[in-house]
Amino acid sequence: MAHKLDVLGLFDNEYRDDGFRTCSVTGLEVHRSVENHVKLFGLTAVVALLYGGIFAFTVAMTRWEAIGLLGPDAFYKHLSLHAWNLLIFWMVFMEIAILYVGGPMVLGRRLPFTKIAKGGWLVMAAGAVLVNYSIWTTQAPNEPPLLTAYVPMPIDPLFYAGAIVFILGTVVAALPFFATMWFEKRENPDSTLPLVSFAAFVTSIIAVEALVGGLVAFTPAMLWRLEIIEWWDAAWYRQMYWIIGHGTQQINLVAMIAVWYFLTHVVAGAEVVSEKVSRTAFILYLFFINLGAAHHLLSDPAVSTGWRLWNTSYAFYGATFASLIHAFAIPAGIEAGRRKRGKGGGLFGWLTSAPWTNPVFASTIFSIILFGFLGGTTGVMMGQLQLNMTWHNTFATVGHFHGTVVLGTTVAFMGLVFFVIRTMFMRKYISKRLASLQPFFYSGAMGVAVLMMMYVGILYGVPRRTAEVVRNIPGTEFSLSAASPLFALFGVFALLAIAGGVLFVLLAVGSLLFGDRVESPSDNADLVADGGSAERSSANDRATEPRDSLEMATDPDDPVHAYEMRGTFVLCLVFLAAFVVTYLLNWYLLTQLWSIGA
Amino acid sequence: MTSHTDADTTASPLAFLRRVLGQAWRDLLSVYYANTTIWRLLKSVGLLFFGFFCWSASNLVLSYGVDWTILQYTRAYGFVLILWGPLTHALVVPLVIRLRRTADGGLTRTIARHGSKINLSIFLTVVLLLGTAPISPMMLDFQSSIGSDSGSDVNPDLACTRADGTVHCHLSESAGVDVVVVTSGDTEITRVEQPPFEFSFQESDLEEVVGQKEFVVELRDEDADTVRRYRRYLSSVPEE
C-alpha cells in the first residue's frame, strides 16, 4: 500500500508480507526499504541534473564567443552553479543510491537504520540548497567559488557552510550501507562479497576519504572567512582541497565501473572473466586512484619535485593499470558471456548482436568506449608531470573531465536511471523509440563537443574559466581567433548535446509521471539479456553469477575462459594504438615548447 | 569454444602467417560489409572521430614546419573521412548490398558488383587531390596574432604608496585606458576619466575583506570593457 505522501504512486510496489519482492529482471530479492531509498536519492539526483543542465546552456553559449551570452561576472556564477550541480549533487546523490543497490539490494537484505538514511538525505538536500543559494547571491567582494574556492580568495561563508553540511549529510547517508556490510560479514564471515558489492564497498572507502578531506579543507577555510581564524595557509588548503576536489571524481569513476559490471551482466549477459583480477583492480584503485589529484598541483610552487615525481610518474600508474584491467575485463566478460549463449558470430558478432535498442545497454557501452578513448587516455596524459604543462588550465582540461564525468559517469548513470525506471518505479518509457535513440544522440553529440574542447585547448592553448577567449582577451592584442572554426563546431555540438540531455530528463520524468505501469514480468522481458528469464535456482544466487535459466549454446558448466575473446583483444589493440599515437603527439607538442640543447 | 585446432600446432610458420592474414582480411571485409543498424552507426561515428583526429593532428604537426609530405595526405584523408566515412557506411554500403540482391542487369548490376570499389576509388582520388592541392577550410591556422603590428597590450604598472592616511596611486602609462575605477568591497571609491590617471583616496574609505583592507583598481577602455584589474591589500602598499 502506498504511503499517504506518495500522491504520484512512485513508491507503490507489490511486496510480500516480509517486505521483499523478487525482481523479474535481476532475480534479486529486493526489500521495500532499500528500493524506496534508492528511488528517493535517484530522483533527487535527476532534479540536480535538470538544474545544472540549464546552466550548461548558458555556459556553453558564452564560451562559444559568436553568441557570447553572458558577461564575465555572470558567466563565472553560472559556471559555478553548473559545476556544483552536475559534478557534485547529481553525482553524489546517485552514488548514495548506487551504494544502496550495491550493498543491501545485491545482498538481498533490508536497509538498516532507514531514519538515518532519510536524515542523511535531508541534510544533503539542505547543503545543496545552501550552496546554490550562496552562489546565486554572491556579491562583491565575494567571488563565485566554482570548484576551487582557494584561500585567500574571498568566498561567501554561506558557501563553505553549505558544502560542509552537504558533506556531513553524505557521510550520514552512507552509514546504513556500512552497517549492511558489517551485518553481512558478521552473518557470513567465510563468504566473499559479490563483485558489485565489493566495488561499492571500495567506492565507499574512497568516498569517506574524499569527504573527510573536504571537511579538513572547508572547515578552517570557513573559520578564516568568518575571521575567527586570522590567517590560513593557502598551500596547505590547496593540498587538502584536492583530496575532495579530485577525490569526488574518483568516487564517480569507481561507482561508474561498479555500474558497468552490474548492467552489462544484467542486460547483456556478461560474465566476470576473473573475479580475482577484477577485485585486484579495485584494490589498486583503493591505494592509488586518489593520487590523480596531484595533477592539479603540478604547476604549484609549493610542492617539491620529489612529490611531483612520486605522484605522477610512479604511484599514479597503479591506478592506470587498474583501469586497463577493467578496460579489458568488462568487454571480455561481455564477449565470453555472449559467446557462451550462442551470441558470438565472427569477430564482433557478440557486440553487434547485443541489445542496442535497449537504452540501458547502449548507455553502458557508450560510457565504456567514450570514457576509455576520450576521458581515460587524456587523464593519464595530463596526470604526467611533463605533459601536464601543455594541458594545465587550458580548455583541454575541461574536455578531459567532460570525457570522464559526462561521457563516462553521467552516461552510465543515465543508463542506470533508465534501468531503475523499468525495474523499481515499474514504469514503461513514454516513448520506447526516443528512449532507444537518446544514448546515441547524447553520447555522439557530447563526444564531438568534448573532442573540440580538447582540440582548442591543446592545439591553441585556449584557457578555461574565461568568458572571452577567441576574439579578445581583455586589454591585449592577444587573439586566438584561429580557433574560431573549431569553436563553432563546439558550439553546435554542445547545443545538440544539451538537447540530448533535455530529452533524457523529459523521458525520465515523463515516464515516471505518464508511463504505463509494468504489470507483469513479461513486460520487462526485453531488459533481460537476450530475452531470457531472470529466475534463479535459489534465492542465494549472487548478481554476478550466471543465471542458469538462460539458454546456453553449449554446456552451461563450461568455465567462461573456455570461450574466445579475440574481438576484445582486437578492440584493446585499437585502444592501445590510439593511446600510443595520442601520447606521442602530446610529447611531440612538448618538445616543440622546449628547445633542449638549442 | 576456443578455435585452437591441431592445424595450429602442425602448420609451418609461413602457412600460419598466411592463415592469420587471410582471416584478418576476411574479418576486415565482414566489418566493412556489416549492415545492421548498429554496425552502420558504429562504423560511421568511429570514422567521424578518426577523421577529426587525423585532420587536426596532421594540421598540428605540419604547423610546426615539419616537412613530411605524407602528413598532407593524412590531413586530406582525415578531412574527407569526416563526411565520407559516415556517407560510405550509412548510405553506400547498404545501397550496394541492396542492389546486389535486387539488380537484374545493366548499369544497376554493374554498380552493384563494383559499387564499393567505385566509392573507394572516388574517395581516394579526392584524398589525393586535396592532399596535393589543399583548400583553405581544411587547413587549420595555428598562428596567433601575438607580435602583430595591429596594436599593443594594455598592461601598465600600477604603483601605490601611502602617507598620513592617504593612498596615492598612478599608472606607468595611459594608452588604451579610458577610465579608471577604484572600488572597495561593493563601494566605488573614486573614478578618474583623464590621463595620466593619478588618484588618491583615504584609507578610512576602504572596506575590510577577510580581515584586511583592500581595494580593486579597474582599467576600462572606451567601450567600458574591463581591460585590466588589480587587487591591492592596504597592508602591502608601502609607506612613503
Image (tube, rainbow, N blue to C red):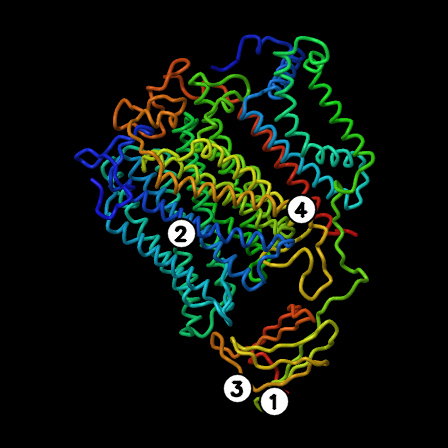
User: Label 3, on which residue?
Assistant: B204
Q: On what subunit does the disc labeled 3 rest?
A: B
**Could you say where residue A446 lies in the image, as x and y percent from the top left?**
55, 42
Q: Quick check: do tags 1 and 2 share a chain?
A: no
* Numbered badge on residue B163: 1
Q: On what subunit does the disc labeled 1 rest?
A: B
Q: Which of marks 3 and 2 is in front?
A: 3
Q: Work out whether residue A116 or residue A540 is closer to the camera in this orientation and state it.
A: A116
Q: Could you tell whether B193 is left or right of A91 in the image? A: right
Q: Identify the residue at the far left of this view.
A: A17
Give the CA distance from mark 3 to mark 2.
46 Å
Q: Earlier in the sequence, mark 2 or mark 4?
A: 2
**Could you say where residue A487 lies in the image, as x and y percent from the top left?**
65, 49
**Could you say where residue A545 lies in the image, as x and y percent from the top left?**
35, 26
Q: On what subunit does the disc labeled 2 rest?
A: A
Picture layout, residue A473 above or below residue B230: above
* Numbered badge on residue A209: 2
> In the rendered image, is residue A238 in sight?
no
Q: Which SS class for mark 1?
A: strand
User: Label 4, on which residue?
Assistant: A486
Give the CA distance from mark 4 to mark 1.
53 Å
Q: Do the residues labelled 1 and 2 touch (CB within 8 Å)?
A: no
For the point 28% across and 47% down, which residue is it?
A176
Q: Which amino acid does label 2 sit on?
A: Glu
Q: Which SS class for mark 3?
A: helix
Packing grade of label 4 (10 A; few <14, some 14-19, many >=20) is some
Q: Nearer the viewer, mark 1 or mark 2?
A: 1
Q: Which SS class for mark 4?
A: helix
* Numbered badge on residue B219: none
Q: Are marks 4 and 3 in contact (CB under 8 Å)?
A: no
Q: What residue type is labelled 3?
A: Ser
